[in-house]
Amino acid sequence: MHTGIDGASSGRSCSGFTSRANFNGLHVHLIGIGGSGMSGAASLLNADGAVVSGSDLTAFDGLGQLVSRGVRVFIGHCESQLPPDVELVIISAAVPSTNPELELARSRGLRVIRYAEFLGEFMSTRRGVAVAGTHGKSTTSGMCVHLFQRSGLSPSFVIGARSNQLGGSSGLGNGESFVVESCEFNRSFLHLRPESAAILNIEPDHLDCYRNVEDIVDAFSQFAAGVRQDGLLVCNGEDARAVRAASFASARIDTFGFSHGLNWQAVDLHEDEGRYSFEVRYNEEPLLRASLAIPGLHNVSNALAAIALAHHGGADCNRIAEAIGTFAGVDRRMTLRMRSHGITLLDDYAHHPTEIRVTIDAARSRYRPRRTLVVFQPHQYSRTRHFMDQFADSFSNADEVIVPDIYGAREVREDPTKDGAEELVSRICRRGGRATYLSSLEAVTNHLTSRLSEGDLVMTMGAGDVWKVADELVERFRISDRAERAAGEKDLVSTGGLCAVSVPAA
């Protein structure tokens, strides 16, 4: 007998999620719970009263927090981990059809939905706010949440990156709005029917599931058409593909950017160490003055989209102006990991040529380094193959690039002579750059440890596990600092320095 969330035996409406109490007491199992979106969904379900369990291949960031909230998490996948009383199973896009837990769930007749479908159903009872685009989704979604929160609108949200400032990668609010980072991979964002949305930009990407860029534009056009007719779609008015996709919307369309004639416009820009202040105009009329705490001209564009969505959602202009200046960004977006011995270490998720280029430029403007050293871990063989020359060009402002082996994610290794890390290093060098191939992350860390000096900026980049290099460098510097302090204290003792203490008279 079918006992899924829309089945009669579950005591819930056959029409789907019709009220906000649908998750209370429901047992939901998430296969692939460790992904940033999936772990956010687990937290959201847990906060909404569901009994939550899940599994993933390896431990992940945020595992301890989920467990502390009562979520039962298994490492590895096997049939015995699917609880007998589960009513709904949610799977990530990376879960294969041969997953043993998934096969058992289907044999039991359980309702199985993908993560994107869950977002769509959760959104159906709220005012959905969906942020889409090839680049900038996590930052802009995080900005939206921050503006809503600081304006007293208490949104629910799921974004693709953690944020201590926001309380994690997800949250259950008391307000009407549900802010979602909306990914175009495998057309997953087409499960959403938002009340308002943004298209930040459209570039070729995910060419493992799209035929070409026209196929991608078509998917974004369908996304635009899915925005509610009484809602709002904001799109980058300086991106021709975004404008073309937005034209399929039946909702009101607002454009944003730097050019005259756009609905939302940033003018009178001032830059200070990579961070911008600017005036926001709406339909040529001054609306507010914004000053960003995060660097990069691209974040001015992201801020315009977030401001437009927050304004439409009912946020007060004065609160928006105040809040935008306190937004600290989201995890792995130019995240400052360390400043020690004159060395600055940043970690970033950039894995597309455009993202790499603008992130390096923003970091150099912010920190003014003597040298910029980038550790780039390519993400997926197909992406590396399709963008090999663009990747090579994107590092033109780096003094040295260190490239470990490709993080294959869901792909099987292809021909390394054509689309491998060594080929990328070769093409960077042929363009006059300096690049080194080191197969393992450990070798990369050892290489950096022996070469870093005062004034260096180090950036770890990629959507895989290159953050481990940043973690290890931070730990090595901590050990070095402790050793230096211990040696200094020993010197003081040997010279009698610690004995020179004056005691005040009673």
Image (cartoon, rainbow, N blue to C red):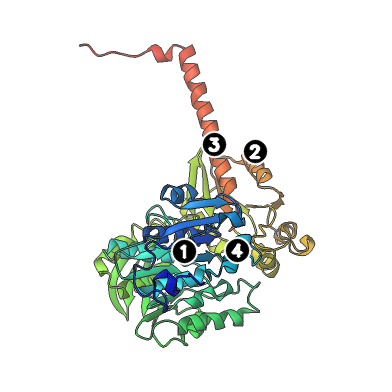
- At a point 69% along the width and 48% down the height, the residue shown is 440
Position of residue 406 in the picture relative to residue 289 (left or right): right
- The answer to which of marks 1 and 2 sits earlier in the sequence is 1
Looking at this view, is 462 or 227 the one in front? 227
Of the two numbered discs 1 and 2 in the rendering, the one whose residue sits closer to the viewer: 1
Where is mark 3, residue-wise?
477
**C-alpha separation, residue under disc 2 versus residue under disc 4:** 51 Å
Three-letter amino acid code of the residue under disc 1: Ser
> Residue 282 is drawn in which quadrant?
bottom left
Where is mark 4, residue-wise?
104
Which secondary structure, mark 1?
A: helix
Give residue 185's mark. none
Looking at this view, is 294 or 368 the one in front? 294
Residue 299: horizontal and vertical position, in percent? Answer: 44, 65
Three-letter amino acid code of the residue under disc 4: Leu
- At a point 55% along the width and 44% down the height, the residue shown is 471
> Residue 174 is drawn in which quadrant?
bottom left
**C-alpha separation, residue under disc 1 versus residue under disc 3:** 30 Å
Which secondary structure, mark 2?
A: helix
- The answer to which of marks 1 and 3 sits earlier in the sequence is 1
Where is mark 2, residue-wise?
450
Asked if one can make out residue 238 in the rendered structure from this viewpoint, the answer is: yes
Give residue 138's mark. 1
